[in-house]
Amino acid sequence: MDVSIIIPARDESGNLPGLLDEIDAAMKPLGLQHEILVVDDGSEDDTWSVLSERAAVDSSLHPIRHRKSAGQSTSLWQAAQLAKGRWLATLDGDGQNDPADLPRLLQHATEGKLEMVAGHRTTRRDTWFKRLSSKIANGVRSRLLRDNTPDTGCGLKVIRRDAFLRLPYFDHMHRYLPALIQFQGGRCESVPVNHRPRGAGESHYGLNNRLWAGLLDLMGVMWLRKRCRLPAECETMDGTADKEEQS
């Protein structure tokens, strides 16, 4: 499997059918073997029914269900454990990320021999409050963590699965993926991507779960940055280097 596309979704029954169609249209010309893992994170609408009906006729779609919401980071982490692709590609389930950007991010990652490529929403299609809060959060995070990433909140990312699986897991880790990858010695770059208005439903993020939780998480990630050690090169008795170091 070349690519595993992961989509956390909560109450997104109105957006998922069109989003899945767009993913198929974007991936088909590439000729890459891919799968789509959609995590229904405790939805109270028809999200699970929509996914179940489509999975019955689409062998590339593999729905996963949380009966109670566990959050975006847990959804991503659990799907990554089940994924079979060498690369993970993540998108939000609200349809604001454009699947047409996926081929370009994948190409950038493979040609640049990167561990991760993060989308950068240069033109946001959100409310002024979300744009302002994201700008402040990105500025503070970038200055403190020095991760050289202008927009970690963008759900559109491409990550090597083996690099992702080596990261420490904690709630809200999805907001700090570029920094966490870099802490492990990986290379991450940002690429401008399209951003669209939400088609249906409502956002589940507000001031409380963006600002206050984010401040606590940031302190924790700063601690990780100081305590993190890069993988050490090791050799066996016959003199061969560790395979991960060679790659």
Image (cartoon, rainbow, N blue to C red):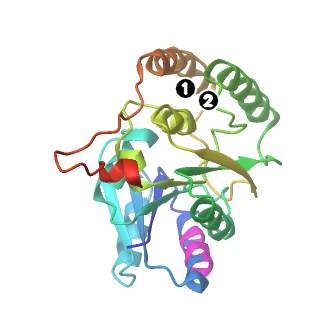
From the viewer's perspective, tell me whether residue 210 is left or right of residue 216: right
Labelled disc at residue 131: none
In magenta stretch: residue 118: no
Q: Distance between the Cα atoms at labels 2 and 1?
A: 6 Å
Q: Residue at x 43, y 72 (%)?
A: 2
Q: What kind of residue is marked 1?
A: Asn
Q: In what quadrant of the picture does the N terminus appear?
A: bottom left
Give whichever of 239, 103 is nearer the camera: 239
Q: Which residues are magenta?
A: 18-26
In magenta stretch: residue 22: yes
From the viewer's perspective, tell me whether residue 203 is left or right of residue 196: left
Q: Residues within 10 Å of mark 1 (few under 14, many from 20)?
A: few
Is there a contact, CB below 8 Å, between mark 2 and mark 1? Answer: yes
Q: Residue at x 68, y 37 (%)?
A: 149
Residue 219 rendering spot, x and y as whole percentages: 51, 14
Q: What kind of residue is marked 2?
A: Gly
Q: Which residue is mark 1?
A: 209
Residue 67 rendering spot, x and y as whole percentages: 29, 47
Residue 94 rendering spot, x and y as whole percentages: 60, 55
Give whichever of 246, 239 is nearer the camera: 239
Whether residue 66 can be seen here: no
Provide the secondary structure element on which disc 1 rests.
helix
Q: Residue at x 49, y 21 (%)?
A: 225
**Res. 178 image quadrant:** top right
Labelled disc at residue 206: 2
Q: Residues within 10 Å of mark 2 (few under 14, many from 20)?
A: few
Whether residue 95 can be seen here: yes
**Res. 205 image quadrant:** top right
Residue 82 rendering spot, x and y as whole percentages: 29, 58
Q: Residue at x 20, y 45 (%)?
A: 236
From what the image shows, is residue 195 above or below residue 164?
below
